[in-house]
Image: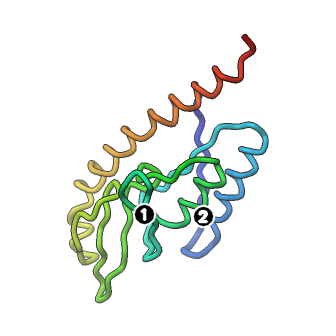
Amino acid sequence: MTRALFVGGTSSNAGKSWMATAICAWLRGRGVSVAPFKAQNMSNNSYPCRTGGEIGRAQVAQAEACGLEPEPAMNPILLKPSGNGASQVVVNGRVWKTLSAREHYAHADELRRRGAGGVRGSVEPFRRDRHRRRRQRRPS
């Protein structure tokens, strides 16, 4: 059974991403198959994934703590501030548009659909990989 763990906090810069990284590393060390996920992140510090696209650097650190290759499915919506209250919106690793905060909220439903599509498509490979690793560990 796949389980999820939510790490929340009361503000930006509270340490949520680094706590999630530590939990991922700890769980991996205990033999648990883990994968990071952050639906939406705001950061100018992005990372170009080997498979294409880009994600926030915190999710890269989390992927590495899990022993996984970073991929856009781990961070389907990345907001990169561009000044004057606007952000470049990266959806599933690809630049989509530059929007003001007001425009961002006006596109919220569309972003949820686009991001959720990435989530639905991204969860399955993690599940398949988990089951593949589990089968490999079974004695013959």
Q: Is residue 62 above or below residue 116?
A: below
Q: Secondary structure at mark 1?
A: strand
The residue under the point 43% across, 71% down is: 42
- Quadrant of the image containing the N terminus: top right
**Three-letter amino acid code of the residue under disc 1:** Pro
Residue 10, label in figure:
none
Q: Secondary structure at mark 2?
A: helix
The residue under the point 54% across, 74% down is: 12
Query: Along the line of sight, which residue is nearer the eye, 50 or 117?
Result: 50
**In whole angstroms, how far apart are the C-alphas of marks 1 and 2?**
19 Å
Q: Give the left or right position of residue 74, taking residue 102 as reference.
A: right
Mark 1 or mark 2, which has the lower sequence index?
A: 2
Q: Which residue is mark 2?
A: 17
Q: Give the left or right position of residue 2, taking residue 65 as reference.
A: left
Judged by depth in the image, the label closer to the viewer, 1 or 2, is 1
Q: Which residue is mark 1?
A: 48
Q: Position of residue 3 (x, y in %)?
A: 60, 36
Q: Position of residue 129 (x, y in %)?
A: 54, 32
Query: Residue 9 lies in what quarter of the image?
Result: bottom right
The residue under the point 32% across, 87% down is: 83
Q: Position of residue 133 (x, y in %)?
A: 63, 28
Q: Is residue 29 above or below residue 11?
A: above
For this orientation, the residue located farthest to the right is 30
Query: Along the line of sight, which residue is nearer the eye, 46 or 82?
Result: 46
**Three-letter amino acid code of the residue under disc 2:** Ser
Q: Is residue 130 above or below residue 109?
A: above
For this orientation, the residue located farthest to the top is 140
